[in-house]
Image: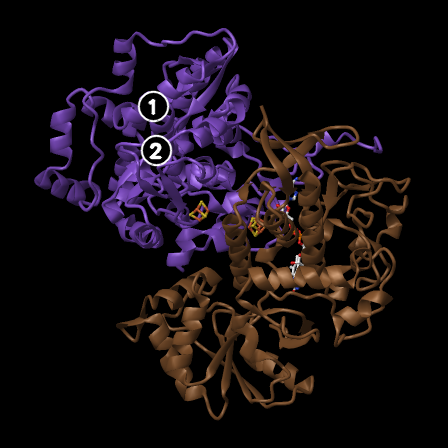
Chain colours: A purple, B brown
Amino acid sequence: MSDARDPTQFDPVVPNTGEEYEPLEVFPDDEDFDLRPGADSCYKCSTCDTNCPVAEVDDDFPGPKFQGPEQWRLKQTDDDYEIDPSISECSNCLRCDTSCPSGVNLAQMHNTARGEYVDNQMSKLSVKYIRNRILANYRTSAYFASMFPRTANFFMNFGPVRWAMEKVLHVPSEREFPEFATQTFRQWWSERGGAKVHSDDKKIAYFHGCYSNYNTPEVAKALVRIYEHFGYEVMVPPQKCSGTPMFANGMLDDARRHAETNVEELTAAIEEGADVVASCTSCSMALRNEYPELFDIDGIDDLAAHTYDAVEYLRIHTDVRQELEAAEVSGELEEEFAYHAPCHARNQGLERQAIELFRDLDGVAVEDVGESCSGISGTYGWKSEKYEKSMEIGSEMFEHMEESEGTTGMTECPTCASQMEHGTGYEVRHPLELIEAALID
Amino acid sequence: MAIESDVLVIGGGLAGLSSAISAAREGADVRLVTYKQSTLRQASGLIDVLGYTPDGEGPLTDPYSAIPELPDEHPYRLLGEDTVREAMSMFDEVVDTYRGGHTDTNALLPTYGGTVKPTARYPDGAAAGLASDDRDLLLVGFEAMPDFDAPHVAAHLEAAGVPFDVRGETIQFPGDLQDDAKVTRYAKLLEKNGPVEVRGRERGARDALVERLNPLIEDEKRVGLPAVLGDADAAGVRAALEAELGVEVFEVPATPPSLPGVRLEDRLFEAFDEAGGNFESGNPVVSFDGQNRVETVYVDKQSARIPYSADQFVLATGGLVGKGVESDREHVYEPIFDCHVEHSEDRYDWFDEAVFGDHPFAGFGVDPDTELRPLDSGGSPEFENLRAAGSVLGGHDFAAEKSGSGVSIATGYHAGRLAAQEAQ
Ligand SMILES: Cc1cc2nc3c(=O)[nH]c(=O)nc-3n(C[C@H](O)[C@H](O)[C@H](O)COP(=O)(O)OP(=O)(O)OC[C@H]3O[C@@H](n4cnc5c(N)ncnc54)[C@H](O)[C@@H]3O)c2cc1C
Ligand code: SF4
Ligand code: SF4
């Protein structure tokens, strides 16, 4: 082997433009982003356009090649250039980013353009802005709702209230609000007295995010039991929203505030020897991809390097695969599942792990319903003006779910789960719940 | 702990998929990891084995008979004619939506540019467009899709001396889509017969298209359209149009972005899945461990390095376009394993003076032995258990020879099979 260069220097993620590439801080000084190297390495192959679920149903949407590199070039040559309003039609599914053969960072381009559009061109008094801000700050609403979960569950889906929300806030009345658990995961965790297993060398810090804390604590509990089964000490540091809904709504200031807490708390856990795992694939993507692309906070790269999806981490560090091959599922989850890979799992290369992992597990069958997008994209489908589009994008997934043998859904993403439920009426489970059913009595 | 398999294929283009499928068919536990989507999304969807000799002679009638005349280092010469044939049979078994396997002779198909192209296999959907068929032909383009200019294509074909009459017409696609509407938008509307507004009334896009096509057809028995006739169910769209129009309908193989390429990619991933293979995409392999053997490769996820170990490895990362071969000002190199890539010291020798001249860079790639193991500068295998397939290989100029897909399928098939046999 020649020693002409160190192959470990190779990094195709960073386009070869011959220029130093430094993702710059977006806020507070938003004049500073420099995405030119990305724009320059676009060779206009349009691969991204063939992957965009919005462009497939709406020809008014100019597509990712325009939203990203082309708009960027326009911005470079014209100081008065205003971000095209179509950026708010982009659902932030990031399929374009996942596909680009040239490694153009479309995710970062869309997020910064959207941030700039919302900051400079969107009225802060408009109903849309206020509605988007409420949707983006789901954690705050969930926090209050979880104090009176039963009342909230009733009230949020109560006809007259939903009618008023549709009229005033443009939140589509077709959607059912997610149910709040009567006990949050964190309440359960402290009642249980925290970790049951202690270890010096096997520790994980769990980033549960908002959803599995307030709405689906059974997923979070499954995670704790599985990791303890494999001898890990589970830590549950204080945390805020990952920021995913805020990025998607261009509210980067809000996202940054939450990110600061998360980075601080999670890097402290990393210093104690833990790796960070998340059960929601949008949360793990935010921590490992979006944070370092958008913010410059002490420890942010360290956090990105230590963050994993919870199932991915098990695959790398434990013999979960062998244990599942030998296991069998009976009882409530002895089922056939129609599995949908969330777009943000795709972005992390995790789109097939559930299929692979459960292939040899007795008692269950998990079928991939294909590569269609669920269409909800977090808060996107929660806007009246996007509802129809969201359902049209999702229709392919609904059809494939109905064609598959299973009548229970499976996915890692809580908002995809709600769309799957909404479109098919199926109950939807998380892969961690199935691992729990297989390995833990 | 690493993620383990018998055979690990790096790269998810035509070469990577062919080797992964071939290894899985041998019974190996195979995993494919790929960085991003491949050149299949840009390629026409035609499968060329050999259209021209390296000296530019052609179009060739029989690609196989030209193999013995190829230079010694050409991938086909390393494999031999029989292996190339076996590989094409595997392709025919796996991809049942393609034709051309009944004969050794190249088919001739019209392209978006109005040329006639020699190719070994073509999708069902292009079949009625064969230039050897003497039935008259009507081509219809859409105003908002300037890439396919039907009257221009028709004039070109006529000038090329095709044995039939050909006319070209341009119409507005029902619903008057935006100029930059994506090919997937057309495909979706046609597949779902989705609603579009035609003169103030809501209509199914496919029904409305039929109404616009009908009056254009004179005595022609076949009509060619841009390659946007459906995505997952292209056969269904074609059948529906044919039933309504009473003529055969075909797609003219496309320029990028190409739905026929996307459909082929989908079909190959499906076949690999059916064969029990595992795959994942989105992150690149960036480094490896090992001396004489590759033990483990590392996939880069943000800054985390995930280890993947295997008994045998296949490198199918593409050429200069796919990022399998890179260049900087001084070197041309293979970036993961730093396998030897033969090139002149002087970068001015990489290019020919003439833009369309004989550029050495088009043939840059790793040079392997007959088992497809990349060789170092001294002519010995770089690693015992690493094979290479597809455009990452040197010794051929796929664009000039029209051999891209054939070389990928043949070398992929061979590398995958040998890797699986070795692993067992
Ligand atoms: C525009 C265009 C048109 C073409 N038209 C035709 C045609 O009409 N007929 C024909 O026969 N052929 C055609 N070809 C050629 C043919 O499609 C392919 O180029 C050829 O088959 C090569 O395939 P491949 O699998 O070797 O490489 P590629 O298709 O380049 O695939 C390489 C794959 O490897 C991945 N990869 C790269 N680096 C890494 C890494 N470090 N880690 C993990 N994965 C990595 C890439 O993301 C990519 O998915 C065309 C090619 C192009 C570019
Ligand atoms: S896929 Fe990448 S290179 Fe191709 S057009 Fe889109 S951004 Fe540009
Ligand atoms: S993020 Fe999704 S919706 Fe937005 S441009 Fe990319 S592919 Fe389209």
Visible in this render: residue A110?
yes
Q: Which residue occupies 37% across, 14% down?
A: A236
Characterize the local packing of mark 1: few (<14), some (14-19) or many (20 or more) Cα atoms within 10 angstroms: many
Which x, y percent locates residue A112? 47, 37
Residues B104 and B391: in front is B104
Q: Quadrant of residue B114?
A: bottom right
Which x, y percent locates residue B400? 77, 64
Residues A45 and B368: in front is B368
Image-based side of B205 in relation to A346, left or right: left
Q: CA distance from mark 1 to mark 2?
A: 9 Å
Circle 1 sits on which residue? Answer: A222
Whether residues under marks 1 and 2 lie with C-beta atoms below 8 angstroms apart, the answer is yes
Say which element carries label 1.
helix
Circle 2 sits on which residue? Answer: A430
Chain letter for mark 1: A
Chain letter for mark 2: A
Characterize the local packing of mark 2: few (<14), some (14-19) or many (20 or more) Cα atoms within 10 angstroms: many
Image-based side of B406 in relation to B377, left or right: left
Q: Which residue occupies 64% across, 63% down?
A: B89
